[in-house]
Amino acid sequence: MMTAAKQPSGTWIPGPILGIETSCDETAASVLAADGAVLSNIIMSQHDVHRRFGGVVPELASRAHIESIEEVSSAALQQAGLVWTELTGIAVTQGPGLAGALLVGVNYAKALAYALNIPFAGVSHLEGHIASAWLQDPTFPLPCVVLVVSGGHTHLYFKEPSGHCRLLGATRDDAAGEAFDKGAQLLGLEYPGGPAIDRLARQGNPHTIMFPRSYLKNGSLDFSFSGLKTALLYKLQAMDEQLSAAQAADMAAGYQEAIVDILVKKSFAAVRASGARALAVVGGVSANSRLRALLQQRAISENLQLSLPPLAYCTDNAAMIAAAGRQALRAGLHAPLTIDAQASMASSFAQTI
Ligand code: KG4
Ligand code: ZN
């Protein structure tokens, strides 16, 4: 078995680390400094490649990652003002994600770690999103509740002072991002649907067209969004004529409000139930302007600390992967270069911040 050779004992002296992310439709690379500061964060989005198909086409995603990975990684290094040999570690998203897309990043990262003879970490994309809450403020307190809301996840965790995450609730059907994307498709908006609904909803009234909220049984911290999507479909089918621009905006605003309302209520219910005094909200949907506004208002009124990462750290990026990889390397979790991409990787949540 081949292991990273510079510190075979598993000890790692923190230095610049390169993170690489290719799990879906963003090719991203980022360099963190020895103290964890973000020196560069390069994201090459493939939205233009997938837009005309209305969603991510896995084969096209893999090809686009292959075409961009070298350029994106070099740009991250250059922006950080470093040369390859100054890197002391490599972190890459090992899973979950699209198998072919993950393979590009994992193999590129392994080759780099081998050539540079430096330690290597394969990290979970989900742990990366969670780590993004501490990128800007490493002193954000624990314990806290973490809501991960992305295209694939709607998960509420309690993050203990040790850094261990305990699952409090999760979606039983669609993820919040999926609800945005599918709703956008029904409304005839372009991919990716979340930002499109966010933009359109700003021109609408969220209370003109009401959508049902599914809270599940009393006290449940699970989520369900599939009924909401069906409600939108029925409302659209019941329209006699084509939606006017104003009606479309009201529809988007009402639909968004239902998703956001549930996310906010369940997050604050989790905070109350857990006794934590801090909440972190991460993942692509945390870029939503209405969600951010409501979370900020409520955090102020309840006197809670809130971590809402800057937009560049909400949607997929490699700074969060480098941060999770940095934690892994510091904990001595150096991966062998024999690891493979894991499309349905589960999280260990053993790492500490
Ligand atoms: O974290 P992310 O980039 O990728 C995954 O790990 O899934 O999240 C992507 C999801 C997509 O569903 C996208 O529509 C949603 O995040 N999203 C948004 C916004 N920006 C991205 N949803 C609502 N409002 C936004 N502004
Ligand atoms: Zn993501």
Image (tube, rainbow, N blue to C red):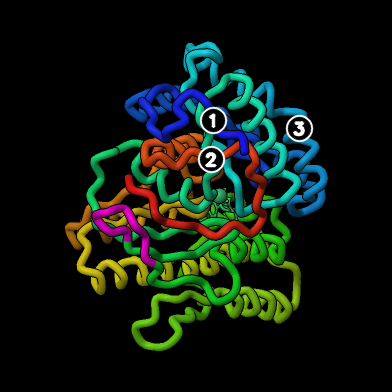
Prevalent SS, magenta region: loop
Disc 3, ligand 1: is the CB inside 8 Å? no
The kind of residue tagged 3 is Ile
The kind of residue tagged 1 is Ala
Q: Which residues are magenta?
A: 159-166
Q: Is 349 displayed left or right of 236 in the figure? A: left
Above or below 28: residue 251: below
Q: Of callouts 3 and 2, which one flags the residue occurring earlier in the amino acid sequence?
A: 3
Q: CA distance from mark 1 to mark 2?
A: 8 Å
Q: CA distance from mark 3 to mark 1?
A: 24 Å
Task: State the residue in front, 85 or 321.
Answer: 85
Q: Is 211 displayed left or right of 66 in the figure? A: left
The kind of residue tagged 2 is Ala
Above or below 225: residue 66: above
Disc 2, ligand 2: is the CB inside 8 Å? no
The residue lying at 40 percent from left, 45 percent from top is 131
Density class for disc 3 (Cα within 10 Å; few <14, some 14-19, many ≥20) is: some
User: Disc 3 marks which residue?
Assistant: 66
Label drawn at residue 335: 2
- Image quadrant holding the C terminus, namely top left
Locate residue 206, reporting x and y percent. 47, 66
Asked whether disc 1 touches disc 2, contact meaning CB atoms under 8 Å apart, the reply is yes
Task: State the residue in front, 212 or 316.
Answer: 316
Q: Of callouts 3 and 1, which one flags the residue occurring earlier in the amino acid sequence?
A: 1
Farthest bottom residue in view: 217
Question: Which numbered mark, 3 or 2, is in the foreground of this view?
Answer: 2
Locate residue 281, reporting x and y percent. 39, 54
User: Disc 1 marks which residue?
Assistant: 4
Secondary structure beneath dot 2 equals loop
Question: Which numbered mark, 3 or 1, is in the foreground of this view?
Answer: 1
